[in-house]
Image (cartoon, grey):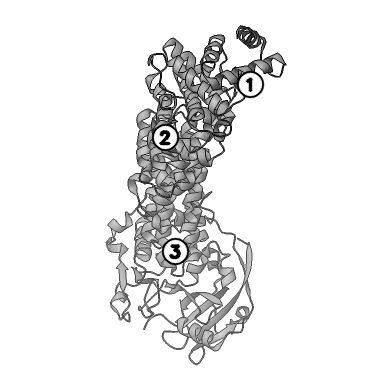
């Protein structure tokens, strides 16, 4: 507040009737007329105790607020004459005055009809006034309760004197913010309640019985202690009374009222809600909920009181400051039934939920659970933001309740691609898999989901996942196998079993994808070489396994893989068939020799081997079958030596071949190449071959 202001003034009194006697400023005709009417005696006749009174009202033509003091003038020639000194306060200056008591000393009653000179110049007013008010608490409470509790009525304080409650009216006026002041009308000496626009009047006890022009009027009769004590006991009343009596323009409530009051056109109607909201916001731990309850009650529409709501509930607002403030406000916005009164852009729930996840994950999860329980649009927005935050901190998925996980997955199925969501117990994993069945449009996520399951070692999930998603899931698993760095592959049985159950899909993936040697090695231990679709793949697709330093940790699976290659080489006459036979023969032969060859694996090969009298001698039958292919398909002698890698195998194969005319010629050609050094073989095989050829 400034210390000094310069204000215009007028003086009205009797001169051939009541009229304007002096003015320091030029006024419009409308302003002059209103001042003339309002400056006259406020009733039909003088009343003892009301020799002087104050009147405050805005000039309807605008620009000024009039604060006037009227004196009864018995010295003038006509009965009922008065002097009225009016001080005109511009709208700008009205906001600069902290306490209107500072103006009262500048009102001056003329000493006579000739004492007019000082009224035609501006008056300079010192605003330095900061004393508290001494007021009757009960009457003050009643006045505030009636004035702001019902905003369409005139409050009449009955009194035998205009001075009894003049200070109370000035304190009430001083407490108001500028916009409310500009529309506030009062009179401390209403000898008749003649002006229906007054907000507060002080009147003699019988004045209230006169015609009020249809305006609602409520009378407070302090002398008879007839006060609305129940209304006055409301929580906001003591707070407002304390502020009013302090006279301190910097008091917290006063600053709050002045900050937000100007947003409301109907000032009296906004006073109580603002006090209630201020009071609710002062309730420490429960202030967020209490404040929102108050705000929702008084301003239920989202487009009302937006600045005030933003002050409390926006990110960084008053209620969010301090430990736990933001989370408490956010939880209130999510769970409170009245949260719809806060505009979406103010609440900004999704973004704030996302931020909370990164700053306080425990509370973020707690609010998410609460959001699930209460439901509604605000809860849905929180969950949307929460799931976005969890997407950047997938470790939060560990230990999260199944119900919350399911909700998040419904909103953001991409979370299934986070390994953390699968890093749970087997039961939790299976529960997630079951939930997948209810989700739609997962086609783009199949591969990432499978990758996440594999990264989390969630093996129990694989059968269901592969069965549901088919080709893309199987392809993802096989690509993952190809990325395993080890050369010896040890895969869990549930995974292998899940792939084995999808043999037709696995076969299609092999046909369409360029798989590496690790995936092919695993697949070769799963497929049946007798199947038409498998043999239709040909031999080239398996060429990468010939001589590859990639093995299966399980001996039985390794033998099965070798048997598969041997079976393909035996059954499909195509480029590379001999190399497949060479790759698989020795391991299968050794298994048959030691009796460890599985019957199912043997059935893979049996259809492509010639009949042999001694059915139990699988080694002999294998040897005969492979030798026959060398002779029939004209495979090169060099491959013959490499295929029968062990000495016993080679000797047996040579004997088998030498027993037929075609085989004898093959052996002669082999020996000739040995003799001229055209066959590159290791020393052990070379000596064995030379010895055999020498005996022939």
* Above/below status of 366 relative to 157: above
Q: Nearer the viewer, residue 11 or 186?
A: 186
> Which disc is residue 304 wearing?
3
The image shows residue 485, relative to residue 200, as above or below, that is: above
Q: Is residue 262 left or right of residue 295?
A: right
The residue that appears at 48% across and 38% down in the rendered structure is: 536
* Residue at (51, 23) in percent of width and height: 628
Which percent across, then down, holds residue 122? 63, 75
Where residue 184 sits, quadrant-wise, is bottom left
Mark 3 Cα shell of 10 Å, populated few (<14), some (14-19), many (≥20): some
Residue 646 appears anywhere in the view: yes
Q: Which quadrant is the C terminus positioned in?
A: top right
Disc 1 designates what residue? 638
- The disc at residue 531 is 2
Q: Is residue 360 visible?
A: no
Q: Give the mark toward the camera: 2 or 3.
A: 2
The span from disc 2 to disc 3 (Cα, nearest Å) is: 75 Å
């Amino acid at each position: 507040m400034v210390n000094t202001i310069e204000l215009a003034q007028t003086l009205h009194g009797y001169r051939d009737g009541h009229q304007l006697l002096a003015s320091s400023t030029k006024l419009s005709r409308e302003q002059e007329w209103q001042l003339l009417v309002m400056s006259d005696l406020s009733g039909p006749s003088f009343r003892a105790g009301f020799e002087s009174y104050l009147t405050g009202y805005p000039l309807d033509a605008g620009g000024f607020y009039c604060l006037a003091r009227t004196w009864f003038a018995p010295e003038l020639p006509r009965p009922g004459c008065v002097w009225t000194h009016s001080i005109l306060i511009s709208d700008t200056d009205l906001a600069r005055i902290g306490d209107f008591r500072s103006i009262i000393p500048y009102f001056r009653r003329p000493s006579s009809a000739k004492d007019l000179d000082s009224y035609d110049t501006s008056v300079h007013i010192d605003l330095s006034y900061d004393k508290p008010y001494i007021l009757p608490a009960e009457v003050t409470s009643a006045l505030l309760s009636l004035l702001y509790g019902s905003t369409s009525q005139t409050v009449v304080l009955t009194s035998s004197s205009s001075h009894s409650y003049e200070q109370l009216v000035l304190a009430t006026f001083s407490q108001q913010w500028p916009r409310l002041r500009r529309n506030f009308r009062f009179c401390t000496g209403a000898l008749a309640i003649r002006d229906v626009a007054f907000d507060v009047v002080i009147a003699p006890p019988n004045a209230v019985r006169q015609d009020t022009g249809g305006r609602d009027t409520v009378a407070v009769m302090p002398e008879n202690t007839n006060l609305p004590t129940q209304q006055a006991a409301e929580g906001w009343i003591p707070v407002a009374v304390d502020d009013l009596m302090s006279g301190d323009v910097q008091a917290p409530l006063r600053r709050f009222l002045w900050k937000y009051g100007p947003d409301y056109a109907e000032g009296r109607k906004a006073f109580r809600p603002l006090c209630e909201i201020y009071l609710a916001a002062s309730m420490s731990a429960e202030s967020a909920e209490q404040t929102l309850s108050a705000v929702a009650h008084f301003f239920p529409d989202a487009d009302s009181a937006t600045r005030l709501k933003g002050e409390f509930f926006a990110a960084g607002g008053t209620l969010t400051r301090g430990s736990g403030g933001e989370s408490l406000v956010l939880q209130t916005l999510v769970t409170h039934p009245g949260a719809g009164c806060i505009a979406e852009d103010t609440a900004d729930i999704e973004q704030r939920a996302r931020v909370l996840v990164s700053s306080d994950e425990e509370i973020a999860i707690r609010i998410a659970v609460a959001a699930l329980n209460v439901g509604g649009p605000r809860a849905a927005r929180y969950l949307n933001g929460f799931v976005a935050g969890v997407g950047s901190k997938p470790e939060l998925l560990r230990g999260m309740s199944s119900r919350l996980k399911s909700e998040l997955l419904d909103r953001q199925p991409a979370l299934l691609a986070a390994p953390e969501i699968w890093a749970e117990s087997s039961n939790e994993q299976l529960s997630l898999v079951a939930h997948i069945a209810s989700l739609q449009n997962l086609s783009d996520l199949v591969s990432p989901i499978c990758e996440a399951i594999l990264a989390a070692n969630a093996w129990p999930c694989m059968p269901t996942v592969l069965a549901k998603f088919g080709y893309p899931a199987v392809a993802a698993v096989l690509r993952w196998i190809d990325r395993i760095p080890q050369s010896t592959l040890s895969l869990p049985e549930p995974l292998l079993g899940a792939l084995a159950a999808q043999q037709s899909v696995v076969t299609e993936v092999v046909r369409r994808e360029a798989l590496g040697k690790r995936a092919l090695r695993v697949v070769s231990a799963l497929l049946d070489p007798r199947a038409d679709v498998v043999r239709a793949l040909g031999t080239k697709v398996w060429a990468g396994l010939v001589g590859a330093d990639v093995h299966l940790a399980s001996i039985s699976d390794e033998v099965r893989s070798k048997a598969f290659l041997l079976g393909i080489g035996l059954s499909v006459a195509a480029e590379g068939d001999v190399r497949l036979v060479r790759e698989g023969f020795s391991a299968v032969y050794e298994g048959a020799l030691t009796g460890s060859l599985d019957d199912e694996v043997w059935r893979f090969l049996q259809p492509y081997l010639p009949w042999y009298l001694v059915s139990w001698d699988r080694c002999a039958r294998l040897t005969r079958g492979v030798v026959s292919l060398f002779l029939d398909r004209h495979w090169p002698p060099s491959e013959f030596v490499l295929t029968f890698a062990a000495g016993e195998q080679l000797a047996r194969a040579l004997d088998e071949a030498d027993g037929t005319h075609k085989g004898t010629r093959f052996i002669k050609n082999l020996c000739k190449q040995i003799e001229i050094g055209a066959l590159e073989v290791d020393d052990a095989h070379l000596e064995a071959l030379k010895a055999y050829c020498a005996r022939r």
